[in-house]
């Protein structure tokens, strides 16, 4: 499942209006970043922040997955890139994570 995120300079937004996803998936919710030229040819890390914890994911060929450690609640996603003395960052994009039904069955 690909979620397209459009990145122009420091501004990132999701292409679709949906910002609600389900916890409990691993390797399923994938972000595809459409990057402006400023981001090309530099290592990029996607940062997911939830409840004061940061989960980082390497962006490879413009893609990364929602970390499996992200649980129900609010989460922010941003990008960070570095190349020599240049540090690039984006705004935070809010994500809403809902609980998957299988968690309700084990409780």
Image (cartoon, rainbow, N blue to C red):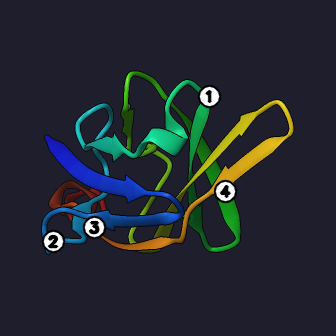
Identify the residue at image location x=50%, y=58%: 9
Report the residue marked by disc 4: 54
Give me the residue at 41% from left, 58% from top.
8
In this rendering, which labeled residue sits more in front, label 1 or label 4?
Answer: 1
Residue 105 drawn at (x, y percent): 19, 60
Given this view, does label 2 or label 4 mark the residue nearer the observer?
A: 2
Cα–Cα gap, marks 1 and 4: 18 Å
Q: Quadrant of the N terminus?
A: top left
Q: Is residue 51 above or below residue 60?
A: below
Which circle's residue, 1 or 2, is located before the other in the chain? 2
Residue 76 drawn at (x, y percent): 50, 69
| Residue 43 disc label | 1
Residue to which mark 2 is pinned: 18
Q: Quadrant of residue 50?
A: bottom right
Q: Earlier in the sequence, mark 2 or mark 3?
A: 2
Kindly check if marks 1 and 2 are in contact, taking CB atoms under 8 A apart as contact.
no
Q: Nearer the viewer, mark 2 or mark 3?
A: 2
């Amino acid at each position: 499942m690909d979620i397209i995120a459009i990145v122009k300079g420091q501004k990132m937004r999701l292409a679709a209006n949906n910002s609600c996803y389900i916890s409990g998936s691993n390797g399923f919710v994938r972000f595809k970043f459409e990057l402006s030229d400023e981001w090309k040819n530099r290592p990029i890390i996607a940062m997911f922040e939830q409840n004061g914890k940061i989960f980082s994911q390497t962006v490879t060929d413009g893609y990364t997955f929602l970390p499996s450690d992200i649980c129900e609640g609010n989460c922010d996603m941003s990008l960070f890139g570095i190349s020599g003395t240049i540090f690039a960052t984006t705004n935070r994009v809010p994500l809403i994570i809902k609980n998957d039904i299988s968690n309700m069955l084990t409780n």
